[in-house]
């Protein structure tokens, strides 16, 4: 399985296919039984959460792990606040937060509002911006549009495409086949802990992918 810069790779599979385990391995939470993880030419037998962060592997989980009562800037700089003589440089942090959101084309007009007041799509944007701010290069999304309405889902899908267009390597784990076909460049089908097949999205159909997921289509 390979993820490239400037591309969205979708990973699909039924429950128990191994998608969540794969995320945990890439995030450094679990160790793989075998195989090699290679990132930017460097090979690793396993990652730790600290090492994954250092080499730019970042995961946006379904719960987003945001502080709802904290404003956008505070969430972006959590644990990495800018200070001088023990005092926070809030204006500078706000300025950097605004620039980061503009660079990522994330529409949040006011970085001083509590994150809990934002829409689902905007909250997803804050989670992504925080990872990019911390050096994320390979961005992994776990069911990014779960429990979202149509408009919010579309906003998140546009953000994912923009990230790929800006040169990030993006992996999306999703059960939503129409969204997978809308946002991805390639699709990796997993079944029972194994990669069954990797396909270019433009060269396959939803029926073929579903058949691979269920096992009704043999892999040559």
Image (cartoon, rainbow, N blue to C red):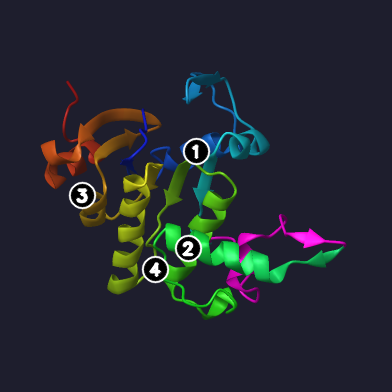
The answer to whether marks 3 and 4 mark residues whose Cβ atoms lie closer than 8 Å is no
Looking at the picture, how far across and down is residue 199, in whole percent?
21, 33
For marks 1 and 3 on the same chain, the one whose residue lies earlier in the sequence: 1
Residues under numbered marks 2 and 4 in contact, where contact means CB atoms less than 8 Å apart: no
Q: Position of residue 162 (x, y in %)?
A: 33, 53
Quarter of the figure with the C terminus: top left
Point out the stretch of residues depicted in magenta.
64-85
Q: What number is the disc on residue 181?
A: 3
Mark 2 vs mark 1, foreground winner is 2
Query: Disc 2 and disc 4: Cα gap in Å?
Result: 24 Å
Q: Which residue is mark 4?
A: 147
Task: Name the residue located 37 percent from the left edge and 62 percent from the top edge.
Answer: 145
Mark toward the viewer: 1 or 3: 3
Circle 4: element type:
loop
Instruction: Quote the CA–CA distance across marks 3 and 4.
Output: 19 Å
Asked if the residue under mark 2 is in contact with the one under mark 3, i.e. CB atoms within 8 Å, the reply is no
Q: Tell me the residue that label 1 is attached to.
A: 21
Q: Residues within 10 Å of mark 4 (few under 14, many from 20)?
A: few
| Residue at 52% in and 78% down | 110
| Residue 143 within the magenta-colored segment of the rendering | no
Q: Position of residue 61 (x, y in %)?
A: 51, 54
């Amino acid at each position: 399985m390979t993820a490239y810069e400037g591309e969205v790779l979708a990973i699909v599979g039924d429950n128990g296919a191994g998608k969540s385990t794969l995320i945990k391995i890439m995030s450094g939470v679990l160790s793989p039984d075998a195989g090699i993880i290679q990132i930017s030419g460097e090979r690793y037998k396993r990652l730790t959460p600290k090492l994954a962060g250092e080499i730019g592997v970042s995961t946006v989980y379904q719960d987003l792990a945001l502080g709802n009562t904290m404003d956008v800037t505070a969430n972006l700089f959590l644990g990495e606040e800018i200070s001088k003589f023990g005092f926070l440089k809030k204006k500078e942090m706000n300025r950097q937060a605004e620039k980061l959101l503009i660079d990522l084309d994330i529409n949040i007009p006011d970085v001083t509002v509590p994150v809990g007041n934002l829409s689902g799509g905007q909250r997803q944007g804050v989670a992504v911006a925080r990872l990019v701010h911390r050096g994320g290069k390979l961005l992994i999304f776990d069911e990014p549009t779960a429990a979202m309405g149509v408009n919010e889902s579309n906003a998140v899908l546009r953000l994912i495409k923009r990230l790929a267009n800006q040169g990030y390597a993006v992996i999306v784990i999703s059960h939503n086949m129409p969204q997978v076909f809308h946002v991805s460049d390639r699709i990796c089908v997993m079944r029972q802990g194994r990669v069954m097949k990797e396909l270019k999205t433009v060269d396959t159909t939803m029926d073929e992918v579903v058949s691979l997921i269920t096992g009704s289509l043999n892999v040559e």
